[in-house]
Amino acid sequence: MKMHQTLLLIAAAAMAMTGCAKKSVEAGIPKVPVLAYPPDGYRFYGAEKICFEWQAAVSHEPAVRLQVSKNNSFNPVVKDTILAGWYSCTNCSLALSDTGDTYYWRVSASDAAGEGGWSETRSFSVPYRSLFVDTIAVADHPGIMAFVTPTQLWVADTSEARLSVISTTLGSVAATSTPGAYDITASPDGQYVYLITRGYLQPLLVLRTSDMALVDTILNVGPINGPFIPNLVAFTPDGDKAYICRMYQNRVLVMRTSDHALIDSVNIGDGMVGGAVHGIAAGISGTDTLIYVATSSAGLIKVIKAGPDTVVATLPAPGIAVRTLVSAPGWGRIFAPSPLSWLAAGGSSFSLIDQGKDGSCLAVSRNGDYLYLAAPRYLGLFNDIRLYIYRTSDMRLMATPRLPCQPTGMIYSPNEDFLYIADGNGHVYKARGLN
């Protein structure tokens, strides 16, 4: 009896080990493989190799047939190949055009018992051979950016040495100005830019965009210290008020934009000693304008109702230390990058998009259809930075092109489908969008 039990244990252990190495399934004709990657509708860029992944449910190594076609009837096919591998074709050589054609793919598995059925059909496309269309040389260390007009992009400098104004029509720097800034925000009408510099009790500087003249200095906005954090100023939709993060003071200052006067100070601290406001964004819920403020010390989002300028809600943040918040066009949604999450304006909680993605540069396309996040492919691996592109209608990941840098700023053009990416090292890259 004891020997019989020992044999059973050995057999069970062998089955467990075999199950770890190879998927166990029923005998007979192989089951239909399950497609894993790319997801349906995915877009590849020229720098990426075409990689397909699936799971073939068989008890021994099968032959897997991969078909690729320009139509979902697979007649004709551009590739029809038998693969010995189980799970993936990691570098399939395909004669793909660069005209944005859509392709369809499917797989089936076969063994000595016969050939199984086809998997589901998925599509993908190769919209361009390269994500980037231009590289604009910028002095010093470009960082946070703001569009003043649809063709005039102002660029702050992470070293605060100067401001650069890029003509997107010419694709070059048209002007520079001092002083520099840590954070830059343009007023909704484009008449002014608001500059924040780091340091103890640093002022908010107001520049007139028509001639880059310093027209106002607003005191007692600082201190601004610590890590590089964008989006410290948010406006109401009509542009009448600006809400300014006063870091390490647990306060949001309210400024009347007609004369740049500070008219209120909203305490969001609730006793959080040493806490900080880390990013601010505006949203619209019905007839209410809501100002969302990320706080670092307790992982909370404070919600200020514009008008009475009082805190009306406290929401759990998607992460312990959300470093920035971004509004979608139309201001119906708020996005947080760490971890990647979204909130419907007026909602009570954030919805997780991707737990494994954590970055600080976030942008939304001009019509709100796509969300862009720059983040390491693997947490902490900064030599492989990807641009994760999500379709906002269902938050599906659509593409992950590799970036040549770790971005210090990212913004979408208001009238063209281009994304501008600052690298902090003398360049602003112009990339194609997905709209």
Image (cartoon, helix red, strand yellow):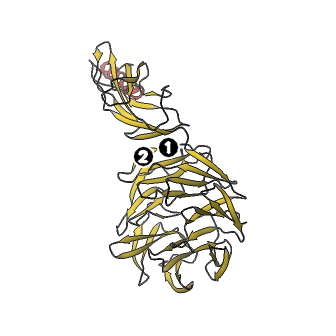
Q: Give neighbour class at mark 2: few <14, some 14-19, many 20+ (Cα, 10 Å).
A: many
* Residue that mark 1 sits on: 400
Instruction: State the residue at coordinates (30%, 28%).
Output: 73
Is disc 2 placed on a helix, strand or loop?
strand
Q: CA distance from mark 2 to mark 1?
A: 8 Å
Instruction: State the residue at coordinates (67%, 71%).
Output: 198
Name above or below for residue 112 compared with residue 102. above
Tell me where residue 169 appears, x and y as whole percent: 60, 57
Tell me where residue 32 appears, x and y as whole percent: 29, 26
Q: Is residue 34 left or right of residue 355?
A: left
Name above or below for residue 27 compared with residue 367. above
Q: Are marks 2 and 1 in contact (CB under 8 Å)?
A: yes
Instruction: State the residue at coordinates (34%, 30%).
Output: 71
Is disc 1 placed on a helix, strand or loop?
loop
Q: Is residue 124 left or right of residue 410?
A: left
Does residue 201 show up? no
Q: Give neighbour class at mark 1: few <14, some 14-19, many 20+ (Cα, 10 Å).
A: many
Does residue 225 show up? yes
Tell me where residue 315 appears, x and y as whole percent: 40, 69
- In the image, 344 versus 276, the foreground residue is 344
* Residue that mark 2 sits on: 397
